[in-house]
Image: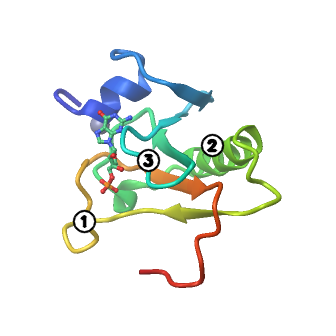
Amino acid sequence: MENCIFCKLANHEIPTNIVYENELVTAFEDANPVAPVHTLIVPKAHMDNILGLSDPDLMVALKDAIDQVAEIKGVKESGFRLINNCGADAGQTVMHLHIHLIGGVSLGEKLI
Ligand code: 5GP
Ligand code: ZN
């Protein structure tokens, strides 16, 4: 989609710090990390949010990316949190589906 920053980052139109990539998904470092590990997992195809996700192949590719990023970032054993903000009340600021993978520190039991 034109003028979508995550379309451009996920498809190499703008260089970024790519952690992992497969055919359908790119994972890159968050520009404003909230923890020692904070990677964004992003479909290469544009969809505004998770409600636009219907392709089973993409669902598998996203799960594979989660697995690989956790391994690469060294948090597979220690654990990590996945966050997906969907819409205004969730505080979604970039309107291209992305999953935050956060870890490298004990995040505690509180969700919010
Ligand atoms: P949201 O609140 O939409 O779930 O999160 C958007 C995330 O994208 C934020 O954590 C923010 O730091 C990150 N972000 C916004 N713009 C850019 C950018 O241009 N490059 C990267 N790498 N991350 C970005
Ligand atoms: Zn996009």
Q: Which residue is drawn at 41% across and 22% down?
A: 11
User: Quadrant for ligand 1?
Assistant: top left
Which amino acid type is marked by label 1?
Answer: Gly
Q: Which residue is drawn at 39% across and 35% down?
A: 45
Would you identify the image quadrant in which residue 105 lies?
Answer: bottom right
Depth check: give the residue in front, 3 or 74. Answer: 74
For the residue with label 3, is its CB less than 8 Å from the closest atom of ligand 1? yes
Q: Residue 16 carries which label?
A: none
Crowding at label 1, few (<14), some or many (≥20) Cα neighbours within 10 Å? few
Q: Where does the image place residue 38, in percent across and percent down from the top left?
A: 52, 48
Which element is circle 2 on? helix
Q: Which of marks 1 and 3 is nearer the N terminus?
A: 3
Crowding at label 3, few (<14), some or many (≥20) Cα neighbours within 10 Å? few
Residue at image mark 1: 91
Crowding at label 2, few (<14), some or many (≥20) Cα neighbours within 10 Å? some
Which element is circle 3 on? loop
Label 1 near label 2: C-beta < 8 Å?
no
Which amino acid type is marked by label 2?
Answer: Ala
Is 95 left, or right, of 112 in this rendering?
left
Residue at image mark 2: 61
- Classify 111 as above or below 83: below
- Image quadrant occupied by the N terminus: top left
Depth check: give the residue in front, 33 or 69. Answer: 33
Which amino acid type is marked by label 3?
Answer: Pro
Q: Where does the image place residue 28, in percent across and percent down from the top left?
A: 50, 34
For the residue with label 1, is its CB less than 8 Å from the closest atom of ligand 1? yes
Depth check: give the residue in front, 48 or 103. Answer: 103
Residue at image mark 3: 33
Is 40 left, or right, of 62 in this rendering?
left
